[in-house]
Amino acid sequence: MVIEHKLEGEDLKCKECGEDLVEIGVKSRKEIIKYVPAKLIVEEHIIYSYACKACEKETGESNIISTEAPKTIFYNSMASHELVAHTLTLKYQHAIPLYRQETYFDMMGATLSRQTLSNWTMAAAKALEPIYNHMKKNC
């Protein structure tokens, strides 16, 4: 992101004579690394069902169709792929134990127990096992 600091309005007038100032170049550039804290977002997915009333009237049976729910790595879990990946990265790359992750997520407004995080870790290991085996075989 580039943020330009330019004079505007009355600041563009010379304080001595009142004439308009003319841009003559860039004085300097400065890069600042900014930290944006992580945040958790709750997505509520509402799955609708539809029925054909014409078929129901004609045959007595409803033709019911439902929209698809988003697929996640764990069946019926609130964990998104991104959240599981973040949990595993914290645990294995940054060596943050699950009890500290529990506190970390609690500070972010999500109550995730150590047991839940542990279950996700074990389920992810099982889900990723075919990839691990393939990589191990090809080394």
Image (cartoon, rainbow, N blue to C red):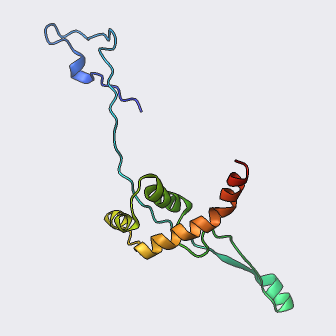
Q: Is residue 123 above or below residue 134?
A: below
Q: Is residue 121 above or below residue 66?
A: above
Residue 64, position as x, y percentages in the image: 75, 81
Q: Is residue 19 above or below residue 31?
A: above
Depth check: 107 or 97 in front? 97
Occupied quadrant, residue 67 = bottom right
Depth check: 70 or 114 in front? 114
Quarter placement of the N terminus: top left
Depth check: 20 or 112 in front? 112
Residue 32, position as x, y percentages in the image: 32, 32
Residue 26, position as x, y percentages in the image: 33, 14
> Quick check: 72 left or right of 100?
right
Residue 96, position as x, y percentages in the image: 39, 59
Residue 120 appears in the figure: yes
Q: Name, please, the residue furthest toward the left.
A: 16
Tell me what residue is drawn at x 76 percent, y 83 percent: 53
**Number of disc labels:** 0
Tell me what residue is drawn at x 35 percent, y 51 percent: 37
